[in-house]
Image (spheres, rainbow, N blue to C red):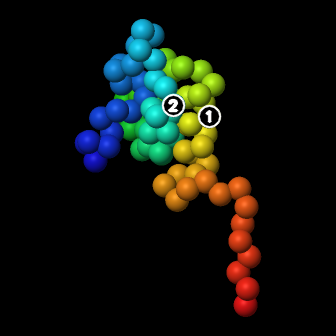
Amino acid sequence: MLVLCSCVPGDGKHDVNKPAGFLWGIWHGWIAPLSLIIGIFNKNITIYESANTGWWYDLAFYMAILGGFGGLSLTRKRIKK
């Protein structure tokens, strides 16, 4: 648990000179539920890194939120009975 949460958004490890990019966006999207819970107890922790690269970070973050660990699927397969 400690290893998973060691890179949460708002922990002060990202600065303006080296903003979070696409891969960090995926990671922050995956751990967003944990970041939300930790943020209740630590006001510095957020679910979204403010020091990011912009559009690419946003895309990766929302892809991870929508897809989670199960993958992103825009279509549904019907189960035949």
Could you say where residue 46 lies in the image, as x and y percent from the top left? 47, 29
Mark 2: amino acid? Phe
Could you say where residue 41 lies in the image, as x and y percent from the top left? 37, 34
Left or right placement of residue 24 versus residue 78 in this view:
left
Left or right placement of residue 29 versus residue 2 in this view:
right
Name the quadrant of the C terminus.
bottom right
Extreme residue toward the left, this view: 2
Which quarter of the figure has residue 64?
Answer: top right
Left or right placement of residue 62 versus residue 75 in this view:
left
Viewer can see residue 66: yes
What is the number of the mark on residue 4? none
Could you say where residue 59 lies in the image, as x and y percent from the top left? 62, 34
Could you say where residue 48 lies in the image, as x and y percent from the top left? 52, 29
Viewer can see residue 50: no
Asked if residue 41 is positioned above or below residue 63 in the image, the reply reads above
Check whether the beta carbons of the residues at disc 1 and disc 2 lie within 8 A of each other: yes
At numbered mark 1, what does the secondary structure look like: helix, strand or loop? helix
> What is the spatial separation of the Cα atoms under label 1 and label 2, in whole angstroms?
8 Å
What is the number of the mark on residue 59? 1
Lower position in the chain sequence, tag 1 or tag 2: 2
At numbered mark 2, what does the secondary structure look like: helix, strand or loop? helix
Asked if residue 33 is positioned above or below residue 81 in the image, the reply reads above
Mark 1: amino acid? Leu
Q: Which residue is drawn at 74% across and 76% down?
A: 78
Q: Residue at x 42, y 24 (%)?
A: 10
What is the number of the mark on residue 22? 2
